[in-house]
Image: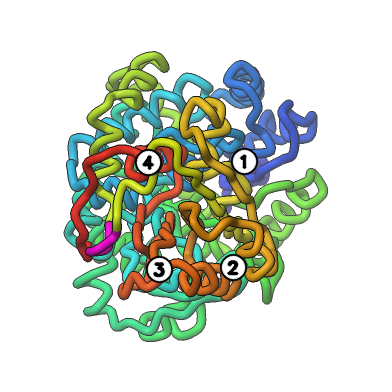
Amino acid sequence: MSPSPAGELARAISTTMLPGFEGHTLPEWVARRLREGMGGVCLFSTNIGSPEQVRQLTSDILAANPDAVIAIDEEGGDVTRLHHEVGSPYPGNGILGRIDDLELTRRVAEGVGAELHAVGCTMTFAPDADINSNPNNPVIGTRSFGTDAGRVARHTAAWVEGIQAAGIAASTKHFPGHGDTANDSHLSLPVIDRSIDELRERELEPFRAAIAAGTKSIMTSHILMPQIDPELPATLSPTILQVLLRGELGYDGVIVSDALDMAGASALTGIPEAAVRAISAGCDLLCIGTANTDEQMGEIIAHVADAVATGRLEDHRVLDAAERVLGLAEWKRTASTSRQSPAAVAAMLAEPKLREDVRASFSVREGVKLPVMSDGAETHLIVIESVPNAAVGHLPWGPQAERHAVGPGAVWPNLTEHLVFDCDAEQLLAGIPSDDNVIIVGQNHHRSELNRKIIDTFRARNADTLVVDMAWPSPDREYADVATFGASRLAGRALIDLLSQPGTPTGDAR
C-alpha cells in the first residue's frame, strides 16, 4: 500500500484517541482536538453533574465533532457514572445473573441505554462478559453475571441486545476474560495461566455470544496469558487480538483498549508507547485514561506518528482503525432503535416485582433468623466502608444509599447507623448494648482483616449477629449470613425489605 497523505494520516491517528478530562464543561483544548478529528471522549464521574449539565456537555462535544464517540463506563450496577452521587437504581449483573430472567436483563440494559441516550452518550463500556471464576477477584466480582459460562453468555447477549436497542453502542469487556485472576490490572499485570483450549471452553463463550448478538465493540483486558502470548498482555498482543478475536472468532467490529493509564498496559513503557503497541496489535480506539491533558495527547499522537514514519507501525493499520471508529457514528445515525423515556425507565425500576425479584435472589444461610427487625427493637447497623477498587470508585452503596436518598426515618425506624472506616473492634462492641440487634454490612469480608476482626468480635458475644456481604462472598460463606451479590441502591432497598419484612429467600449455595 502506498503511503497515505500526511494530513489524512494525522487525522486518522487522532480518530483513534479517546481521552478523558476534568470538569463539567468542555475544555477548549478538547474542543480543538475534536475539530481536528479526535475520535471522541470518555466521561467519568468528575464530568457528571445534573442531566441538564451532561446534555449541554455532550451537545458541545458533538458540535465540535459530529462523529465523536461519547463513551462512559456505565454498567448499571456497582459501576455507575450517571448515578455516582446517589448510587445505582439498577440491580447489577451479579443479581441479574442470579435472577436469570433474560427478558429482565434486556429491559434493564435498555433502561440504561435510554438514560444514556437522554444525556447524549453514544457508547458504554458494558456489558462485563467476564466469568467470575475466582472468588478472590478484586475488580470483577459482582460486575459479572456469574460463574457459569453458559449463564454469563446468555445474559451478556441479552444485555448487548437491550443497550443497542436504545441506540447505545455496547463495548463488551474484558477480552479474552478478566474473571480468573486475583489481581487488579489497574495496579499490576495479572497473569492467567490457561491454555487456548481452556479459554475456548469457558472464557470465550460469552464473547462469542456478544458477537452473535451484534456488539458494536469489544474492550480488551490488560491480562497476560503466557500459554497464548508469553510476552504481551491482551491489549498489546497481535496473537490475541488479530489471530484469536479477529481470526478465530470472526469479529469485525471496533476493538477498544481498556484505559492505557492502567499499570497493566503502560507501567513498563509509558502511555505513548503503549498506544503504538495497542494500535499495532489490533486496537482501533484507545481509551487513554481519566484526567488527560492537551500536552499529554500531543505527546501520544506525535509518538504514534513517529512510529508510522519509522516503519514500526503500518499506516494502513491506523487508517483501518480510524475507519472502524467512524463506522460507529454511521451506525448511530442509521440504527433502528426503540426509545424509552426517562419516565418509563423510572416506572420500570419502581415495579414491586423487580424489588421482589432482587430480594429473592439473595443467598441466606440455613438457620439464619429473619427478619431481624421487630416492633420497638433497637437495631445497630454497622456499615464497614472499604477502599473501593478503581473501576467502582467512591459512591453511595447498599442500605445507607437508600436510607440517605429517602430519609432515614422513612425507611427504617429504631435504627442506629455506625459508619466504620477503621476502628478498634472491642471499642465498637463496648458502645453497643448486648441485647440490641446487630447487623454488619460490608463488601468482601473474607478478603479484609478489619472486617473479619469486627465480625469475629461481635459473633463471640452474640452468635445471632447478622453478617451481610454485598459483594461476591467466599464459597464457604463463612462471613456471609446473607450474600446479595451486588451493592447498588436498589440492592440496598431490597436488603432493607429482607431484614425488616416477613417472607425471605431460602438458604442456597448458588
Task: Check residue 414 for magenta coloring.
Answer: no
Q: In the rendered structure, which disc, 2 or 3, sits on the residue that comes first in sequence?
A: 2
Q: Nearer the viewer, mark 4 or mark 1?
A: 4
Q: Which mark is residue 111?
A: none
- Quarter occupied by residue 11: top right
Q: Magenta segment, which residues? A: 364-368
Give the Cα separation between the discs numbered 2 and 1: 20 Å
Q: Which mark is residue 265?
A: 2
Q: Which mark is residue 463?
A: 3
At 71% from the left and 40% from the top, the residue drawn is: 21
Determine if residue 261 is in view. Answer: yes
Residue that mark 4 sits on: 374
Element on which disc 1 rests = loop
Q: Position of residue 260 (x, y in %)?
A: 61, 59
At 39% from the left and 14% from the top, the residue drawn is: 343
Q: In the rendered structure, which disc, 1 or 3, sits on the residue that comes first in sequence?
A: 1
Q: Nearer the viewer, mark 4 or mark 2?
A: 4
* Circle 4/circle 1 CB separation < 8 Å: no
